[in-house]
Amino acid sequence: MSVNKYKYNLGNALVLILIIEAIFWVFAIASYRYLTINVEEFRFEREYVLYGLIFIPIAILLYFYSTHWKNKTLVKYADEKLLPYVYTGISSFKSITKFILLRLGLAFIVIAMANPQYGENEKLVESKGIDIMIAIDVSNSMLAEDLQKNYNRLKIAKLSIEKLFDKLHGDRVGIVVFAGDAYKQVPITPDYHVAKMFLKNISTGMISAQGTNIGLAIEKCVSSFNMEDGSNKAIIIYSDGEDHEEEGINAAKEAAKKGIKVYTIGMGTKTGVPIPLYKNGIKVGNKKDKEGNTVLTKLNEPYLIDISESGSGSYTRANGLNVGIEGIVEQLNAIEKTTMSQEKYTGYDDQFQPYLLIGILLLLIDFFITDKRNKLTDKFNLFKNHG
């Protein structure tokens, strides 16, 4: 019995693979040229992935190298008389079929990963929301650390506002800082990233005029809105409420008459605590009055409640690091949204699914086929070895 029965027929395999390669590349290039010329909307989302097809010729070389090595090893170490007892032989037909299935399967997977697309369509995306102005108290009393150790009132307020921005979708925001005076820090913008960037730089040293003029802060927020655009509006005030002017209630009523809701968030506790003094970032003591007595600050909750009620909003009191922003977000979401912007963009329909399915099926078939000989494959004379 000839040992050739147990060897791979590399000559016939080479011819068949070259034929398959020629058919594949002619069909692939012709299809690509036809689609790019005649289908205006055709494209590959990740065209660079197609360079992965270059590895197919490398796989072919590896296949022939490995089969040639197996043939040499068989001749070198196998005894022809013992082969029928220790080795059933291989089928060149099944071996080359397995490789072709693997080669085509990988090619279809690469094409699927490149994601062919066609069916261009224009889509209109609407952004809906409300306008929100946030007023932040930057008076020295906001340096008190009565809510959480190592966290002053202002720092907790800023952390809360960051979380608020993360929970908003489609709304426009702006920031006003206030103490004895009020300034617009960030005009109304849909860009939360920009608002966060300015938020980080807010400090108690921004306004020299001390005090807590909430009324002026509300007026500054109202003037920041475009009252002609038809969008619903809200003001959120972060403060300890130590306002000795008490103009905030009237300002909140005026805002409510214009359809602007006013929400207040109480920053602090009802127990009087000292106001730290810092020099070059180092605490050097506590604030004292002219007589040398330590100045104490505490939350003026009734005043903040009156402002929110006058402004048709609600009041929330901070508790440690928890400012209760979730409840305010729910109320903001309940306000009717208006269209802020409309953007048109071109969309493409993904068509990778059939290529991925074909690729997976080919690889599965390859997985379940073995290259062992059987009576059926012996009938394919084209792949028989002679010698």
Image: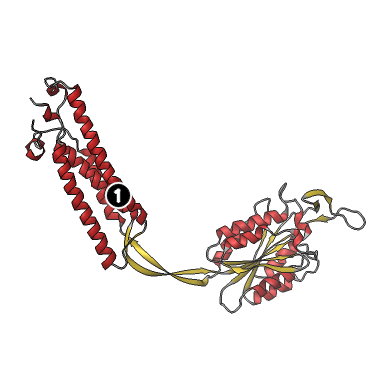
Tell me the element at label 1.
Answer: helix
Quarter in which the C terminus is drawn = top left
Which residue is nearer to you in this view: 8 or 188?
Answer: 8
Question: Residue 91: percent from the left, percent from the top?
Answer: 14, 35
Residue furthest bottom as drawn: 228
Q: Can residue 360 be spotted in the picture?
A: no
Q: Would you place residue 62 above or below residue 144 in this image?
A: above
Q: How dense is the environment of label 1, judged by Cα within 10 Å: few (below 14), some, or many (20 and up)?
A: some
Question: Residue 31: percent from the left, percent from the top?
Answer: 24, 60
Q: How many marks?
A: 1
Question: Residue 23: percent from the left, percent from the top?
Answer: 18, 52
- Say which residue appears at 53% left-offset and 70% top-offset: 336
Which residue is nearer to you in this view: 113 or 23?
Answer: 23
Q: Would you place residue 25 above or below residue 83 in this image?
A: below
- Say which residue appears at 59% left-offset and 79% top-offset: 228
Residue 233 image-quadrant placement: bottom right
Q: Can residue 374 be spotted in the picture?
A: yes
Question: Residue 303: percent from the left, percent from the top?
Answer: 75, 65
Amino acid type at image mark 1: Leu
- With 278 as the anchor, is 38 left or right in this view? left
Which residue is nearer to you in this view: 248 or 9?
Answer: 9
Quarter in which the N terminus is drawn = top left
**Residue under label 1:** 53
Q: How is the image coloured?
A: secondary structure
Residue 124 image-quadrant placement: bottom left
- Say which residue appears at 75% left-offset and 57% top-offset: 142
